[in-house]
Amino acid sequence: MLLQDQVARPVPGREPVPLCWEFGCSILSDDKGMPIWGQIGLLRRKNKTMQNILDHLKSQQETALSELCDFLRIPSISADSKYVPDMQRCADWVMASMKDAGLTAKIFPTKGHPIVYGERIRDPKLPTVLVYGHYDVQPPDPLDLWTTPPFEPQVRDGKLFARGATDDKGQLFTHLKSIAAWVKLNGELPVNVKVLIEGEEEVGGANLDHFLETQGELLKADVAVVSDTSQYGDGIPAITCGLRGIVAAEVRLKGPSKDLHSGIYGGSIANPVNALAKMCGKLVGDDGRVQIPGFYDDVVELTPLELEQYAALPFEESHFLKEVGSSATFGETGYTTLQRRTARPTCDINGIAGGYQGEGPKTIIPSRATAKITCRLVPTMKPAKVLDALEAFLKSNCPPGIEFEFKRSHGCEAFVFDPTSDWLTAARKAVETAFGQPPVLVREGGSIPVVLSFKQILGIDTLLLGWGRNSDNLHSPDEHIHVQDFHRGTRASACLWAELAKVQS
Protein backbone atom coordinates (compact mmCIF):
# COMPACT_ATOMS: atom_id res chain seq x y z
CA MET A 1 0.00 0.00 0.00
CA LEU A 2 1.34 3.44 -1.00
CA LEU A 3 1.41 6.02 1.79
CA GLN A 4 1.29 9.35 -0.03
CA ASP A 5 2.78 11.35 2.82
CA GLN A 6 5.99 9.29 2.91
CA VAL A 7 8.55 10.21 0.29
CA ALA A 8 12.30 10.30 -0.01
CA ARG A 9 14.24 13.25 1.31
CA PRO A 10 14.00 16.13 -1.23
CA VAL A 11 17.05 16.90 -3.31
CA PRO A 12 17.44 20.32 -4.96
CA GLY A 13 16.44 20.11 -8.58
CA ARG A 14 14.82 16.70 -8.21
CA GLU A 15 11.28 15.57 -7.65
CA PRO A 16 10.68 13.60 -4.44
CA VAL A 17 10.96 9.86 -5.02
CA PRO A 18 7.83 8.05 -3.81
CA LEU A 19 7.88 4.81 -1.95
CA CYS A 20 8.13 1.58 -3.88
CA TRP A 21 4.69 -0.04 -4.12
CA GLU A 22 6.12 -3.48 -3.47
CA PHE A 23 8.06 -2.49 -0.34
CA GLY A 24 5.25 -0.55 1.33
CA CYS A 25 6.66 2.13 3.61
CA SER A 26 10.35 1.65 2.81
CA ILE A 27 11.94 5.03 2.01
CA LEU A 28 13.84 4.90 -1.24
CA SER A 29 16.69 7.30 -0.59
CA ASP A 30 20.13 7.00 0.87
CA ASP A 31 21.75 9.30 3.44
CA LYS A 32 22.39 11.90 0.71
CA GLY A 33 18.82 11.88 -0.53
CA MET A 34 19.66 9.81 -3.59
CA PRO A 35 17.26 7.09 -4.79
CA ILE A 36 18.29 3.62 -3.73
CA TRP A 37 16.61 1.44 -6.33
CA GLY A 38 19.96 -0.29 -6.76
CA GLN A 39 20.15 -1.02 -3.06
CA ILE A 40 16.72 -2.61 -3.11
CA GLY A 41 17.78 -4.74 -6.04
CA LEU A 42 20.78 -5.83 -3.99
CA LEU A 43 18.49 -6.65 -1.06
CA ARG A 44 16.29 -8.69 -3.35
CA ARG A 45 19.30 -10.62 -4.61
CA LYS A 46 20.58 -11.24 -1.09
CA ASN A 47 17.18 -12.43 0.08
CA LYS A 48 16.92 -14.68 -2.97
CA THR A 49 20.38 -16.08 -2.33
CA MET A 50 19.54 -16.86 1.27
CA GLN A 51 16.23 -18.46 0.32
CA ASN A 52 17.92 -20.54 -2.37
CA ILE A 53 20.40 -21.83 0.18
CA LEU A 54 17.66 -22.69 2.68
CA ASP A 55 15.69 -24.45 -0.07
CA HIS A 56 18.78 -26.39 -1.08
CA LEU A 57 19.41 -27.49 2.51
CA LYS A 58 15.83 -28.70 2.74
CA SER A 59 16.18 -30.72 -0.46
CA GLN A 60 19.37 -32.32 0.85
CA GLN A 61 18.16 -33.28 4.33
CA GLU A 62 18.20 -37.04 3.76
CA THR A 63 21.68 -36.89 2.28
CA ALA A 64 22.98 -34.80 5.18
CA LEU A 65 21.47 -37.24 7.68
CA SER A 66 23.04 -40.20 5.88
CA GLU A 67 26.45 -38.52 5.92
CA LEU A 68 26.08 -37.79 9.63
CA CYS A 69 25.38 -41.48 10.22
CA ASP A 70 28.66 -42.32 8.47
CA PHE A 71 30.41 -39.91 10.85
CA LEU A 72 28.71 -41.48 13.88
CA ARG A 73 29.69 -45.02 12.94
CA ILE A 74 33.34 -44.28 13.69
CA PRO A 75 34.03 -45.15 17.37
CA SER A 76 36.24 -42.13 18.06
CA ILE A 77 36.68 -42.71 21.81
CA SER A 78 39.60 -40.52 22.88
CA ALA A 79 39.81 -41.88 26.43
CA ASP A 80 40.66 -45.46 25.40
CA SER A 81 44.02 -46.15 23.75
CA LYS A 82 42.70 -49.14 21.82
CA TYR A 83 40.67 -46.73 19.67
CA VAL A 84 43.71 -44.77 18.44
CA PRO A 85 43.32 -46.14 14.87
CA ASP A 86 39.65 -45.11 14.89
CA MET A 87 40.62 -41.62 16.05
CA GLN A 88 42.92 -41.26 13.04
CA ARG A 89 40.21 -42.67 10.77
CA CYS A 90 37.75 -40.12 12.13
CA ALA A 91 40.22 -37.25 11.62
CA ASP A 92 40.66 -38.39 8.01
CA TRP A 93 36.87 -38.45 7.58
CA VAL A 94 36.55 -34.90 8.96
CA MET A 95 39.28 -33.62 6.62
CA ALA A 96 37.54 -35.20 3.63
CA SER A 97 34.24 -33.63 4.70
CA MET A 98 35.90 -30.22 4.98
CA LYS A 99 37.25 -30.55 1.45
CA ASP A 100 33.82 -31.61 0.19
CA ALA A 101 32.44 -28.41 1.74
CA GLY A 102 34.89 -26.30 -0.27
CA LEU A 103 37.55 -25.72 2.39
CA THR A 104 41.26 -26.24 2.07
CA ALA A 105 42.02 -28.69 4.87
CA LYS A 106 44.94 -30.25 6.69
CA ILE A 107 45.55 -32.63 9.59
CA PHE A 108 47.96 -31.49 12.31
CA PRO A 109 49.46 -34.32 14.39
CA THR A 110 49.79 -33.72 18.14
CA LYS A 111 51.27 -35.68 21.04
CA GLY A 112 47.77 -37.10 21.38
CA HIS A 113 45.00 -37.24 18.80
CA PRO A 114 45.08 -35.24 15.53
CA ILE A 115 43.65 -31.76 15.04
CA VAL A 116 41.87 -31.07 11.74
CA TYR A 117 41.94 -27.54 10.32
CA GLY A 118 40.24 -26.07 7.25
CA GLU A 119 39.62 -22.59 5.91
CA ARG A 120 38.06 -20.56 3.12
CA ILE A 121 39.34 -16.99 2.97
CA ARG A 122 37.36 -14.80 0.60
CA ASP A 123 38.53 -11.29 1.48
CA PRO A 124 40.71 -10.24 4.45
CA LYS A 125 38.50 -7.16 4.84
CA LEU A 126 35.48 -9.32 5.69
CA PRO A 127 34.85 -10.67 9.20
CA THR A 128 36.67 -13.93 9.89
CA VAL A 129 34.84 -16.58 11.90
CA LEU A 130 36.61 -19.46 13.65
CA VAL A 131 34.35 -22.50 14.02
CA TYR A 132 35.31 -25.05 16.67
CA GLY A 133 34.11 -28.58 17.31
CA HIS A 134 35.39 -31.96 18.49
CA TYR A 135 35.17 -35.33 16.79
CA ASP A 136 35.97 -37.43 19.86
CA VAL A 137 33.17 -38.93 21.94
CA GLN A 138 32.61 -40.29 25.43
CA PRO A 139 32.97 -44.02 26.13
CA PRO A 140 29.57 -45.68 25.54
CA ASP A 141 29.53 -47.78 28.72
CA PRO A 142 27.36 -49.31 30.11
CA LEU A 143 26.56 -50.98 26.80
CA ASP A 144 23.64 -53.02 28.15
CA LEU A 145 21.65 -49.82 28.72
CA TRP A 146 21.66 -48.90 25.02
CA THR A 147 18.53 -49.81 23.08
CA THR A 148 20.63 -50.20 19.93
CA PRO A 149 24.45 -50.38 19.64
CA PRO A 150 26.08 -46.96 20.22
CA PHE A 151 27.96 -46.91 16.93
CA GLU A 152 25.15 -48.21 14.75
CA PRO A 153 23.06 -45.04 14.18
CA GLN A 154 19.30 -45.52 14.08
CA VAL A 155 16.39 -43.10 13.71
CA ARG A 156 13.48 -43.76 16.08
CA ASP A 157 10.57 -41.44 16.87
CA GLY A 158 12.20 -38.53 15.07
CA LYS A 159 15.51 -38.93 16.92
CA LEU A 160 18.88 -40.15 15.67
CA PHE A 161 20.46 -42.44 18.29
CA ALA A 162 24.24 -42.92 18.47
CA ARG A 163 27.18 -41.93 20.63
CA GLY A 164 28.22 -38.43 19.55
CA ALA A 165 24.88 -37.63 17.92
CA THR A 166 24.58 -34.38 19.85
CA ASP A 167 27.99 -34.20 21.61
CA ASP A 168 29.45 -33.08 19.31
CA LYS A 169 29.44 -34.68 15.88
CA GLY A 170 25.83 -33.85 15.02
CA GLN A 171 26.17 -30.22 16.03
CA LEU A 172 29.54 -29.48 14.41
CA PHE A 173 28.43 -31.19 11.19
CA THR A 174 25.68 -28.58 10.75
CA HIS A 175 28.36 -25.98 10.06
CA LEU A 176 30.13 -28.07 7.46
CA LYS A 177 26.84 -28.66 5.63
CA SER A 178 25.86 -24.98 5.69
CA ILE A 179 29.30 -23.96 4.40
CA ALA A 180 28.96 -26.52 1.61
CA ALA A 181 25.56 -25.11 0.63
CA TRP A 182 26.87 -21.53 0.42
CA VAL A 183 29.85 -22.54 -1.68
CA LYS A 184 27.82 -24.76 -4.02
CA LEU A 185 25.03 -22.25 -4.70
CA ASN A 186 26.76 -18.90 -4.30
CA GLY A 187 30.36 -19.73 -5.10
CA GLU A 188 31.52 -18.08 -1.87
CA LEU A 189 30.59 -17.39 1.73
CA PRO A 190 29.72 -13.86 2.90
CA VAL A 191 32.48 -14.18 5.55
CA ASN A 192 35.86 -15.82 5.87
CA VAL A 193 35.68 -19.10 7.78
CA LYS A 194 38.29 -21.12 9.62
CA VAL A 195 37.27 -24.49 11.05
CA LEU A 196 39.14 -26.19 13.89
CA ILE A 197 38.02 -29.67 14.95
CA GLU A 198 39.99 -31.51 17.62
CA GLY A 199 39.99 -35.03 19.04
CA GLU A 200 40.67 -34.54 22.75
CA GLU A 201 37.82 -32.42 24.12
CA GLU A 202 36.36 -35.32 26.11
CA VAL A 203 39.70 -35.95 27.84
CA GLY A 204 40.58 -32.36 28.67
CA GLY A 205 42.10 -31.15 25.38
CA ALA A 206 45.68 -31.36 26.70
CA ASN A 207 47.29 -30.52 23.34
CA LEU A 208 44.87 -27.88 22.09
CA ASP A 209 46.30 -24.90 23.97
CA HIS A 210 49.77 -25.65 22.59
CA PHE A 211 48.29 -25.69 19.09
CA LEU A 212 46.55 -22.35 19.70
CA GLU A 213 49.75 -20.82 21.05
CA THR A 214 51.92 -22.00 18.16
CA GLN A 215 49.38 -21.39 15.38
CA GLY A 216 48.11 -17.98 16.46
CA GLU A 217 48.60 -16.34 13.06
CA LEU A 218 46.86 -19.19 11.24
CA LEU A 219 43.89 -19.04 13.61
CA LYS A 220 43.53 -15.24 13.69
CA ALA A 221 39.82 -14.37 13.64
CA ASP A 222 37.25 -11.82 14.80
CA VAL A 223 34.92 -14.18 16.64
CA ALA A 224 34.57 -17.89 17.34
CA VAL A 225 31.49 -20.08 16.99
CA VAL A 226 30.98 -23.24 19.06
CA SER A 227 27.93 -25.50 18.85
CA ASP A 228 28.44 -27.78 21.85
CA THR A 229 25.64 -26.50 24.08
CA SER A 230 21.85 -26.94 24.02
CA GLN A 231 18.56 -25.26 23.43
CA TYR A 232 16.81 -24.10 26.58
CA GLY A 233 13.92 -26.50 26.11
CA ASP A 234 11.68 -28.21 23.60
CA GLY A 235 11.17 -25.66 20.82
CA ILE A 236 12.91 -22.89 22.80
CA PRO A 237 16.21 -21.98 21.10
CA ALA A 238 18.94 -20.49 23.24
CA ILE A 239 22.26 -18.71 23.04
CA THR A 240 24.53 -19.51 25.96
CA CYS A 241 26.09 -16.42 27.50
CA GLY A 242 27.88 -18.16 30.34
CA LEU A 243 29.51 -21.47 31.21
CA ARG A 244 30.62 -22.92 34.49
CA GLY A 245 34.27 -23.79 34.82
CA ILE A 246 35.59 -27.12 36.06
CA VAL A 247 38.36 -28.86 37.98
CA ALA A 248 38.84 -32.62 38.03
CA ALA A 249 40.89 -34.85 40.32
CA GLU A 250 41.29 -38.40 41.51
CA VAL A 251 42.01 -39.39 45.11
CA ARG A 252 43.73 -42.72 45.69
CA LEU A 253 43.97 -44.46 49.04
CA LYS A 254 46.21 -47.43 49.88
CA GLY A 255 45.92 -49.47 53.05
CA PRO A 256 47.37 -52.96 53.53
CA SER A 257 49.71 -54.35 50.89
CA LYS A 258 47.06 -56.86 49.79
CA ASP A 259 43.37 -57.63 50.35
CA LEU A 260 42.90 -59.18 53.80
CA HIS A 261 40.35 -61.55 55.37
CA SER A 262 37.81 -59.31 57.11
CA GLY A 263 37.16 -61.89 59.81
CA ILE A 264 40.80 -62.29 60.79
CA TYR A 265 41.92 -58.67 60.35
CA GLY A 266 38.70 -56.64 60.54
CA GLY A 267 38.76 -54.02 63.28
CA SER A 268 42.54 -53.97 63.54
CA ILE A 269 43.53 -51.83 60.55
CA ALA A 270 41.98 -48.99 58.54
CA ASN A 271 39.79 -50.01 55.60
CA PRO A 272 40.54 -47.78 52.56
CA VAL A 273 36.98 -48.09 51.19
CA ASN A 274 35.46 -47.13 54.57
CA ALA A 275 37.89 -44.22 54.81
CA LEU A 276 37.16 -43.00 51.30
CA ALA A 277 33.41 -43.19 51.79
CA LYS A 278 33.68 -41.14 54.98
CA MET A 279 35.99 -38.57 53.39
CA CYS A 280 33.77 -38.13 50.33
CA GLY A 281 30.66 -37.93 52.51
CA LYS A 282 32.05 -34.82 54.18
CA LEU A 283 32.41 -32.85 50.94
CA VAL A 284 28.76 -31.68 50.72
CA GLY A 285 26.50 -30.89 53.66
CA ASP A 286 22.82 -31.68 54.12
CA ASP A 287 22.03 -28.13 52.99
CA GLY A 288 23.73 -28.76 49.64
CA ARG A 289 26.65 -26.45 50.38
CA VAL A 290 30.20 -27.60 49.75
CA GLN A 291 32.05 -27.97 53.05
CA ILE A 292 35.57 -27.30 51.78
CA PRO A 293 36.98 -24.27 53.67
CA GLY A 294 37.28 -21.21 51.41
CA PHE A 295 35.31 -22.82 48.57
CA TYR A 296 32.91 -19.87 48.20
CA ASP A 297 35.44 -17.08 48.83
CA ASP A 298 35.69 -15.99 45.17
CA VAL A 299 32.12 -16.72 44.07
CA VAL A 300 30.35 -13.79 42.39
CA GLU A 301 26.64 -13.68 43.20
CA LEU A 302 24.00 -13.22 40.52
CA THR A 303 23.06 -9.59 39.82
CA PRO A 304 19.47 -8.33 40.20
CA LEU A 305 19.17 -8.26 36.39
CA GLU A 306 20.34 -11.86 36.14
CA LEU A 307 17.87 -12.89 38.81
CA GLU A 308 15.09 -11.24 36.79
CA GLN A 309 16.20 -13.11 33.67
CA TYR A 310 16.15 -16.41 35.53
CA ALA A 311 12.68 -15.69 36.86
CA ALA A 312 11.43 -15.03 33.32
CA LEU A 313 12.60 -18.40 31.98
CA PRO A 314 9.94 -21.10 31.80
CA PHE A 315 10.74 -23.94 34.22
CA GLU A 316 8.56 -26.65 35.69
CA GLU A 317 10.04 -28.64 38.55
CA SER A 318 7.79 -31.62 37.85
CA HIS A 319 8.84 -31.75 34.19
CA PHE A 320 12.50 -31.51 35.21
CA LEU A 321 12.14 -34.40 37.67
CA LYS A 322 10.43 -36.53 35.07
CA GLU A 323 13.16 -35.73 32.56
CA VAL A 324 15.98 -36.83 34.87
CA GLY A 325 14.02 -39.71 36.42
CA SER A 326 14.20 -38.55 40.03
CA SER A 327 11.61 -38.09 42.77
CA ALA A 328 13.01 -34.91 44.35
CA THR A 329 15.49 -32.12 43.75
CA PHE A 330 18.52 -31.47 45.96
CA GLY A 331 20.97 -28.64 46.11
CA GLU A 332 22.27 -25.54 47.78
CA THR A 333 19.70 -23.92 50.05
CA GLY A 334 18.52 -20.46 49.00
CA TYR A 335 18.72 -20.98 45.23
CA THR A 336 16.30 -22.30 42.65
CA THR A 337 16.93 -25.55 40.82
CA LEU A 338 17.68 -23.65 37.63
CA GLN A 339 20.18 -21.38 39.37
CA ARG A 340 21.89 -24.32 41.07
CA ARG A 341 22.22 -26.12 37.72
CA THR A 342 23.84 -23.26 35.84
CA ALA A 343 25.16 -20.50 38.08
CA ARG A 344 26.27 -22.03 41.39
CA PRO A 345 29.45 -24.02 42.16
CA THR A 346 29.30 -27.73 42.95
CA CYS A 347 31.39 -30.66 44.11
CA ASP A 348 30.49 -34.16 42.91
CA ILE A 349 31.83 -37.68 43.16
CA ASN A 350 31.86 -39.00 39.59
CA GLY A 351 32.96 -42.52 40.38
CA ILE A 352 34.16 -44.58 43.33
CA ALA A 353 35.87 -47.95 43.27
CA GLY A 354 37.54 -50.40 45.62
CA GLY A 355 37.33 -53.97 46.80
CA TYR A 356 35.34 -56.81 45.32
CA GLN A 357 32.86 -55.92 42.54
CA GLY A 358 31.76 -59.39 41.39
CA GLU A 359 28.62 -61.37 42.09
CA GLY A 360 28.03 -62.62 45.63
CA PRO A 361 29.99 -61.79 48.83
CA LYS A 362 33.70 -61.72 49.33
CA THR A 363 34.69 -60.92 52.91
CA ILE A 364 37.79 -58.77 52.57
CA ILE A 365 39.38 -55.56 53.70
CA PRO A 366 40.38 -54.04 50.34
CA SER A 367 43.90 -52.80 49.94
CA ARG A 368 42.97 -49.84 47.71
CA ALA A 369 40.16 -47.40 46.96
CA THR A 370 39.79 -44.53 44.47
CA ALA A 371 37.32 -41.74 43.77
CA LYS A 372 37.02 -39.37 40.84
CA ILE A 373 35.84 -35.88 41.77
CA THR A 374 34.89 -32.77 39.83
CA CYS A 375 33.93 -29.29 40.97
CA ARG A 376 31.98 -26.91 38.73
CA LEU A 377 33.14 -23.30 39.07
CA VAL A 378 31.49 -19.91 38.60
CA PRO A 379 33.02 -16.45 38.17
CA THR A 380 35.59 -15.67 39.60
CA MET A 381 36.78 -18.96 41.11
CA LYS A 382 40.32 -20.08 40.23
CA PRO A 383 40.88 -23.75 39.33
CA ALA A 384 44.26 -24.08 41.03
CA LYS A 385 42.96 -22.54 44.25
CA VAL A 386 39.96 -24.87 44.31
CA LEU A 387 42.14 -27.94 43.73
CA ASP A 388 44.48 -26.86 46.53
CA ALA A 389 41.54 -26.53 48.90
CA LEU A 390 40.04 -29.87 47.82
CA GLU A 391 43.32 -31.71 48.31
CA ALA A 392 43.92 -30.14 51.71
CA PHE A 393 40.39 -30.98 52.89
CA LEU A 394 40.56 -34.63 51.83
CA LYS A 395 44.06 -35.12 53.19
CA SER A 396 43.10 -33.66 56.56
CA ASN A 397 40.28 -36.20 56.81
CA CYS A 398 42.38 -39.22 55.82
CA PRO A 399 42.83 -41.58 58.83
CA PRO A 400 46.18 -42.97 60.04
CA GLY A 401 47.39 -46.10 58.31
CA ILE A 402 46.20 -44.96 54.88
CA GLU A 403 48.52 -43.66 52.17
CA PHE A 404 46.98 -40.63 50.43
CA GLU A 405 47.54 -39.68 46.78
CA PHE A 406 45.86 -36.78 44.95
CA LYS A 407 46.07 -36.69 41.15
CA ARG A 408 45.04 -33.47 39.40
CA SER A 409 43.42 -33.47 35.98
CA HIS A 410 42.05 -30.82 33.60
CA GLY A 411 40.44 -27.56 34.64
CA CYS A 412 39.21 -24.20 33.34
CA GLU A 413 37.62 -21.02 34.64
CA ALA A 414 34.00 -20.00 34.19
CA PHE A 415 33.04 -17.82 31.23
CA VAL A 416 30.48 -15.02 30.77
CA PHE A 417 29.83 -13.34 27.39
CA ASP A 418 28.66 -9.75 26.85
CA PRO A 419 24.93 -10.05 25.96
CA THR A 420 24.97 -6.66 24.17
CA SER A 421 27.70 -7.56 21.66
CA ASP A 422 27.06 -6.99 17.94
CA TRP A 423 28.18 -10.57 17.28
CA LEU A 424 25.53 -11.89 19.63
CA THR A 425 22.87 -9.66 18.08
CA ALA A 426 23.72 -11.12 14.67
CA ALA A 427 23.54 -14.64 16.06
CA ARG A 428 20.13 -13.96 17.59
CA LYS A 429 18.76 -12.91 14.19
CA ALA A 430 20.13 -16.06 12.54
CA VAL A 431 18.68 -18.38 15.18
CA GLU A 432 15.31 -16.64 15.06
CA THR A 433 15.14 -17.05 11.29
CA ALA A 434 15.86 -20.78 11.49
CA PHE A 435 13.79 -21.67 14.55
CA GLY A 436 10.89 -19.29 14.00
CA GLN A 437 11.24 -17.54 17.37
CA PRO A 438 13.90 -15.48 19.12
CA PRO A 439 16.36 -17.37 21.31
CA VAL A 440 16.56 -16.87 25.06
CA LEU A 441 19.91 -15.99 26.64
CA VAL A 442 21.02 -18.49 29.27
CA ARG A 443 23.91 -19.74 31.31
CA GLU A 444 24.88 -23.38 30.94
CA GLY A 445 26.06 -25.63 33.74
CA GLY A 446 28.63 -27.48 31.65
CA SER A 447 32.17 -26.47 30.80
CA ILE A 448 33.86 -25.89 27.44
CA PRO A 449 37.52 -25.10 28.22
CA VAL A 450 38.30 -23.97 24.68
CA VAL A 451 36.14 -20.87 25.17
CA LEU A 452 38.53 -19.53 27.79
CA SER A 453 41.52 -20.57 25.67
CA PHE A 454 40.17 -18.62 22.71
CA LYS A 455 39.85 -15.54 24.91
CA GLN A 456 43.22 -15.80 26.65
CA ILE A 457 45.34 -17.03 23.72
CA LEU A 458 43.63 -15.72 20.57
CA GLY A 459 41.89 -12.70 22.13
CA ILE A 460 38.46 -13.47 20.69
CA ASP A 461 35.02 -14.05 22.17
CA THR A 462 32.89 -17.09 21.42
CA LEU A 463 29.28 -17.44 20.33
CA LEU A 464 27.81 -20.56 21.97
CA LEU A 465 25.00 -21.73 19.70
CA GLY A 466 23.52 -25.07 20.68
CA TRP A 467 21.10 -26.98 18.47
CA GLY A 468 20.64 -30.02 20.72
CA ARG A 469 18.77 -30.44 24.00
CA ASN A 470 19.87 -31.22 27.54
CA SER A 471 17.52 -34.21 27.39
CA ASP A 472 19.51 -35.77 24.52
CA ASN A 473 21.36 -38.07 26.95
CA LEU A 474 24.78 -36.48 26.57
CA HIS A 475 27.44 -38.79 28.09
CA SER A 476 24.69 -41.37 28.76
CA PRO A 477 23.28 -44.48 27.05
CA ASP A 478 20.90 -43.81 24.17
CA GLU A 479 22.45 -40.45 23.29
CA HIS A 480 20.52 -38.87 20.44
CA ILE A 481 19.73 -35.70 18.53
CA HIS A 482 16.29 -34.76 17.27
CA VAL A 483 16.40 -34.92 13.47
CA GLN A 484 14.43 -31.67 13.33
CA ASP A 485 17.03 -29.96 15.53
CA PHE A 486 19.85 -31.14 13.27
CA HIS A 487 18.15 -29.62 10.23
CA ARG A 488 17.18 -26.41 12.06
CA GLY A 489 20.75 -26.07 13.30
CA THR A 490 22.03 -26.37 9.74
CA ARG A 491 19.64 -23.62 8.61
CA ALA A 492 20.66 -21.41 11.53
CA SER A 493 24.31 -21.92 10.63
CA ALA A 494 23.61 -20.91 7.02
CA CYS A 495 21.83 -17.75 8.19
CA LEU A 496 24.63 -17.02 10.65
CA TRP A 497 27.24 -16.39 7.96
CA ALA A 498 25.01 -13.77 6.33
CA GLU A 499 24.28 -12.01 9.62
CA LEU A 500 27.89 -12.01 10.84
CA ALA A 501 28.95 -10.45 7.52
CA LYS A 502 27.04 -7.30 8.55
CA VAL A 503 29.06 -6.77 11.75
CA GLN A 504 31.77 -4.15 11.61
CA SER A 505 34.69 -5.64 13.50
Image: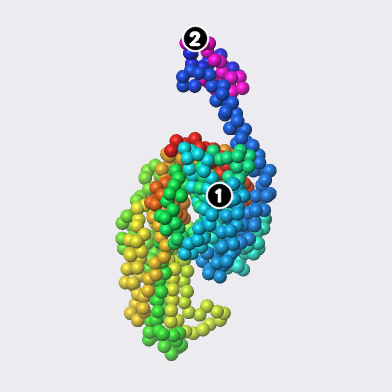
Task: Estimate the x, y position of residue 122 in percent, counting from the top left.
Answer: 53, 40
Q: Is residue 176 above or below residue 385?
A: above
Please name the residue shown 45% across and 81% down the image.
366
| Image quarter (top left, top right, bottom left or bottom right) of the N terminus | top right
Give the mark nearest the N terminus, 2 or 1. Answer: 2
Task: Estimate the x, y position of residue 333 in percent, counting from the top left.
Answer: 39, 56
Please name the residue shown 57% across and 29% down the image.
43
Q: Is residue 313 above or below residue 135?
A: above
Marker disc for residue 104: 1
Mark closer to the observer (2, 1): 1
Q: CA distance from mark 2 to mark 1?
A: 54 Å
Image quarter of residue 370: bottom left
Task: Estimate the x, y position of residue 369 in percent, counting from the top left.
Answer: 44, 76
Asked if residue 435 shows in the view, the reply is: no
Q: Which residue is mark 2?
A: 13
Please name the residue shown 61% across and 38% down the image.
186
Magenta residue span: 12-29
Disc 2 residue crowd, few under 14, some 14–19, many 20+, Cα 10 Å? few
Q: Is residue 253 above or below residue 242?
A: below
Instruction: Judge by depth and name the residue closer to the eye, 398 or 220.
Output: 220
* Three-letter code, disc 2: Gly
User: Which secondary structure class fits the magenta region best?
Assistant: loop
* Three-letter code, disc 1: Thr
Instruction: Judge by depth and name the residue closer to the eye, 303 or 139.
Output: 139
Residue farthest to the bottom, as pictured: 264
